[in-house]
Amino acid sequence: QVQLVESGGGMVQAGGSLRLSCTASISTRDIYTMDWYRQAPGKEREFVANIIWSSNFTDYADSVKGRFIISRDNAKPTVNLQMHNLQPEDTATYYCSTTTPGRSWGQGIQVTVSS
C-alpha cells in the first residue's frame, strides 16, 4: 500500500492562491501518474489534474484550466498543485492519488475559499 502525505491546504479569500503538495512513499521509478481529485460537501469526487510521471504530460479539468498548475519534483516522489485565482466553488477536500498502476489515495486536505 502506497502512503501519500498531503500538505499545504488552508483558507484563502477569493482571488487568492494556495499550493498543495503530496509525497509518496515509493520510488519515482514506480509511479505511473500522480493525480489530484477533490470532493465538495454533498458532491461526488471529481478529477482536478494529473501528471504522467515519465513524460511530464499534464491534464486538467476544464474548471481549473488556466488557474491551476500541476508539477512534479523529479528528485523525489512529490507532486505539487499551484492554485491561483481561487473561487468559492473550489472549496473542497483535495485528495492526492497515484497509479502504480494500482490506485492509492491520500487522506485528503481541506481547501476553503471565502467570498
Image: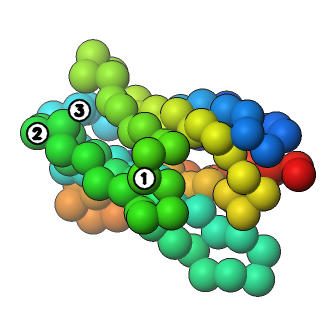
* 34 left or right, relative to 69: left
**Which element type, helix, strand or loop, lies under badge 2?**
loop
Residue at screen point 51% across, 44% down: 67
Dividing the picture into quadrants, the one containing residue 88 is bottom right
* 51 left or right, relative to 37: left
Q: Give the image location of residue 5, x and y in percent.
A: 56, 39
What residue is pinned by disc 2?
55
Residue at screen point 52% across, 34% down: 82
Amino acid, disc 1: Lys
Q: Give the image location of residue 115, x and y in percent.
A: 88, 52
Q: Which mark is residue 28?
A: 3
Give the mark, 2 or 3, whose residue is nearer the N terminus.
3
Dividing the picture into quadrants, the one containing residue 74 is top left
Q: Is residue 113 above or below residue 48?
A: above
**Which of 69 and 106 lies nearest the eye of the viewer?**
69
Give the mark, 2 or 1, whose residue is nearer the N terminus.
2
What residue is pinned by disc 1?
65
Q: Mark 3 and mark 2 in contact (Cβ < 8 Å)?
A: no
**Which element type, helix, strand or loop, lies under badge 1?**
loop
**Which of 56 and 28 lies nearest the eye of the viewer?**
56
Q: How far apart in space, not on screen, are marks 1 and 3 (Cα)?
A: 26 Å
Q: Is residue 60 visible?
A: yes
Residue at screen point 49% across, 38% down: 81
Q: Give the image location of residue 86, x and y in percent.
A: 68, 45
Give the foreground label among 2 and 3.
2
Q: Give the image location of residue 65, x and y in percent.
A: 42, 52
Give the mark, 1 or 3, whose residue is nearer the N terminus.
3
**Which element type, helix, strand or loop, lies under badge 3?**
helix
Q: How far apart in space, not on screen, are marks 2 and 3 (Cα)?
A: 12 Å
Q: Is residue 59 above or below residue 9?
A: below
* 43 left or right, relative to 53: right
Q: Quadrant of the N terminus?
A: bottom left
